[in-house]
Image (cartoon, helix red, strand yellow):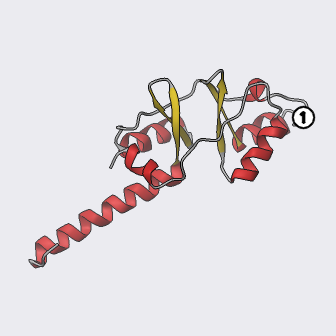
Amino acid sequence: MDVKHVLQHKPAGVWSTSPRSTVYEALELLAEKNVGALPVLEEGRLVGMFSERDYARKVILRGRSSKEATVGELMSTPVYTVGPNEPIETCMQLMTERHIRHLPVIEGDRVVGMISIGDVGKAIIADQRVVIRDLESYITGAPG
């Protein structure tokens, strides 16, 4: 299974924020859209990621105010990305090695989607179920 297939089962569109937005504004968007991370775009170009983890580790623990700090001050860089044709196993490997939970999907120079660790886990489980069903059919001689 590839990233494109996973994106087909998600709502269209990508929510994003700006490096000039306050952390508070970004948190409002995270809560409103029920997402855990936002790509940070400047003039349509991906410049960072802002997540709940960034808030917890960089605002609260540093004694900063979410209404005064900007996303650009606290966003995570570099940003690891994948293309729509990447195998989902590549996403799992990248997320595991880099300890990240969200990957922007880039096509050309545009962010066309977001893949979360939950999306990756569901896709891998779905693939395994198909393999198991096919193996059971093969062993029992039943049609798949």
Question: In the figure, is residue 84 to the left or right of 34?
Answer: left
Q: What amino acid type should be assigned to the residue bearing mark 1?
A: Gly
Quadrant location of residue 42? Answer: top right
| Residue 47 picture location, percent across and down | 63, 23
> What residue do we see at 51% from left, 53% from top?
10
Question: In the figure, is residue 59 to the left or right of 111?
Answer: right
| Residue 23 picture location, percent across and down | 81, 35
Say which residue label 1 marks.
63
- Helix, strand, or loop for circle 1? loop
Q: Nearer the viewer, residue 132 or 26?
A: 26
Residue 141, placed above or below residue 19: below
Q: Are there few (<14), some (14-19), or many (20+) residues within 10 Å of tag 1?
A: few
> What residue do we see at 36% from left, 38% from top?
86
Q: Nearer the viewer, residue 110 or 6?
A: 110
Q: Nearer the viewer, residue 15 or 88?
A: 15
| Residue 106 picture location, percent across and down | 48, 31
Question: In the figure, is residue 123 to the left or right of 49?
Answer: left
> What residue do we see at 40% from left, 44% from top?
3
Furthest residue in direction left, as rendered: 141
| Residue 107 picture location, percent across and down | 44, 30
* Quadrant showing the C terminus: bottom left
Residue 37, placed above or below residue 46: below
Quadrant location of residue 40? Answer: top right
> What residue do we see at 80% from left, 46% from top?
28
